[in-house]
Amino acid sequence: MHPHRKTTPSLPFLLNSVDHLGRTIDPSVLSVAQEIGPGAVRYAEKVLGDPALAISLFEETAATVSKTRQEKAARGKPDVTDIRGYLFLAYMRRVRRQKRMEAVLNDPTSLSLARQAQYADVQDMERSLFLAEALASCDKVTQNIVLRRLEGYSWKEVERRCGVSSGAARERFSSTVQRLRKALQQSRRVT
Amino acid sequence: MPAVRRKQKRSARESYSEKTLLKFVKEHLSKEYPNPRREGCPSQAILKRMARDPQQVDASIIYHVFHCSPCYKTCSGLLARLKASR
C-alpha cells in the first residue's frame, strides 16, 4: 500500500486586465494569456531573475497584442489567426530584448565569452519553453500517445491502451513531432 | 545548385531527427519541473490507473504529469514496468 501523499494546491495564475502603462488587455487576449502565462512567465523569471519584471513584461506584451489586433481591425486588415502563438512569440522577443539590454547596461565594455555562455543557457531555457508550449497544446489522447512512445511502446500497444487505431495514433504522433520540430526551429529564430 | 534545392538541403540539415526530439522531450519532462513540494500531485494509485487505462483518467492528470518532473518519472517507471510485464 502506498500512503496518501499530502499535496498543496498550486496557486492560480492571475493577470491584470490593464498593463503598467494603463493600456487595457482585450478579454480574448487575456484568456489566452491566462493559459500560456504560467509557463512563459516562469521561464522569464529564470532568465531575468525578477518575477515582477517578468509579469510586467507579459502584461505589456498582452496589451500590445490587443492594440495590434484593434489597429488591424480598424484598417480592415485580417485578424491574427493564432493569438496563442503570436502572443507567445511576442513575449519571447520582449524577454530576449530585455535580457540583451540588461547585459549591455551591466557590462558596456562588451561581449565576452561569459556573455556568450549566458546566451547558451538562455537558449537552452528557450528550447525547453518552446517544447513545453508545443506539448501543452496537444490534446489528452495525443499526450498519452507521446507518453507511451517515449517509453518505447509499439503502435499495437498504443492502440490497445489509448483507444485509437494505430494509424490514427501514428498520424497524431507524427503531427506532434512536426510541431515540436517547428517549435524548436522557432526558438532558434527568436534568438 | 538551384536556390530551392539549397534551401531544402539547409532546412533538412537544421531540423532535428525524431530520435533527437524525443530525447529532448524526455530530458525536458524529467528535469524542467522539479516541484519539490509536490504541489497538486495526484496519488500513486491515480498514476497507476493512468498507466494502465489512460482513457479512464481526467485530462488534468495527464496535464499535470507533463508539468511535474517527479510525477513524470513515476509515470515513466510505471509504464516501463507495465511494458516489461506484457
Image (cartoon, coloured by chain):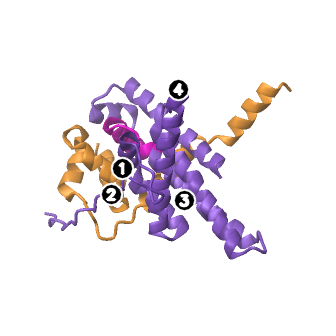
Eye-nearest disc, 3 or 2: 2
Question: Does residue A132 lie above or below A84 as drawn?
Answer: below
Q: Is residue A128 left or right of residue B57?
A: right
**Image: magenta residue range:** A134-152
Instruction: Name the residue that disc number 2 marks.
Output: A13
| Amino acid at circle 1 | Gln
Indicate yes or no whether the magenta region holds residue A143. yes
Q: Are marks 2 and 4 in contact (CB under 8 Å)?
A: no
Instruction: Name the residue that disc number 1 marks.
Output: A34
Residue B74 or residue B7, whichever sits in front: B7
Q: Earlier in the sequence, mark 1 or mark 3?
A: 1
| Amino acid at circle 3 | Met
Q: CA distance from mark 2 to mark 4?
A: 31 Å
Q: Is residue A187 left or right of residue A112?
A: left
Secondary structure beneath label 4: loop
Instruction: Name the residue that disc number 4 marks.
Output: A78
Q: CA distance from mark 3 to mark 4?
A: 33 Å
Q: Are marks 2 and 1 in contact (CB under 8 Å)?
A: yes
